[in-house]
Amino acid sequence: MLQNEIPKYLYIIAAGEVEMSYTCPYGYSVIIGTCAKGDVCGDIGVLLHRLQPFEFRTRTSCTLLRLDAKTFLDIVRDFVEDPSIILSNLLKHLKDQDLMKEYLTVTDDEGKLRRGRMKRPLPLSLHNIISRDDDSLLYQLLAWGFDPNESNKNGETALHIAASTGSVPCVVLLLKYRANPYIRDNRGLKRLVPRNTRRH
């Protein structure tokens, strides 16, 4: 699997070892680590629909299970909670491996490209993430350009949900990313305290 391509398959290593490397802008390659039995290759490209940041090469004779990305995503889309759990686990894994900051930070150009037009391979909803009180995943999605004012079928925004559940970290994050506190839901409710009635 080459760096800077969007993979069409997920590979699960059943036996053997796969080397993971990163080619720097200056042209030299750095070995990041190895993947062994039970590890997955291609998950970043498939789950985030972005260019694969690593290159994978077999180090030994390997047995790989290949799963078509479209088939996998079609299965996941049938379950409401699964996408946020899958992505949360992926980001936790990358953070544990100290890979998040270096390879998953969105550049300004990427951010501009994604805002309003971000293709979502996973049917992620800020509402589900806030319901799980996962402010770290919420932060990452907002940084990638997810709309903080997206609403559900009831016209409730992510800020409505965060305020009604009392999730202060999520409320603060949404306001930082310019969520509008004056949007009303389909019943005409703001669910937030209006400015002129706040206590000082």
Image (cartoon, rainbow, N blue to C red):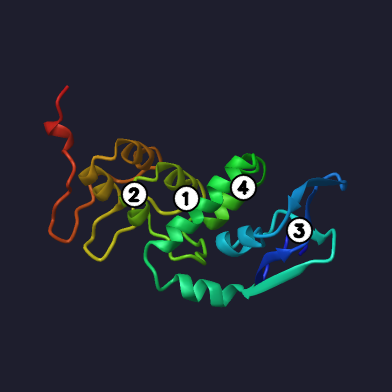
- Disc 3: CA contacts within 10 A as few (<14), some (14-19) or many (>=20): some
Callout 1 amino acid: Leu
Give the mark nearer the N terminus: 4 vs 2: 4
Do the numbered discs 4 and 3 sit on residues whose CB atoms are within 8 Å? no
| Residue 94 relative to residue 186: left or right | right
- Disc 2: CA contacts within 10 A as few (<14), some (14-19) or many (>=20): many
Q: Residue at x 25, y 66 (%)?
A: 153
User: Which residue has dot 3 on it?
Assistant: 3
User: Which residue has dot 2 on it?
Assistant: 130
User: Which residue has dot 1 on it?
Assistant: 141
- Disc 1: CA contacts within 10 A as few (<14), some (14-19) or many (>=20): some
Do the numbered discs 4 and 2 sit on residues whose CB atoms are within 8 Å? no
CA gap, disc 4 and disc 3? 14 Å
User: Which residue has dot 4 on it?
Assistant: 104
Callout 2 amino acid: Ile
Q: Which residue is drawn at 62% across and 61% down?
A: 43
Residue 199, above or below 177:
above
CA gap, disc 1 and disc 4? 11 Å
Callout 3 amino acid: Gln
Residue 90 placed where, x, y %? 55, 52
Q: Under tag 3, what secondary structure? A: loop
| Residue 97 relative to residue 117: left or right | right
Callout 4 amino acid: Leu
Residue 200, above or below 173:
above
CA gap, disc 1 and disc 3? 23 Å
Q: Under tag 2, what secondary structure? A: helix
Give the mark nearer the N terminus: 1 vs 4: 4
Q: In this rendered view, identify the residue nearer to me: 112 or 167.
A: 167
- Disc 4: CA contacts within 10 A as few (<14), some (14-19) or many (>=20): some
Give the mark nearer the N terminus: 4 vs 3: 3
In this rendering, which labeled residue sits more in front, label 2 or label 1? 2
CA gap, disc 2 and disc 1? 12 Å
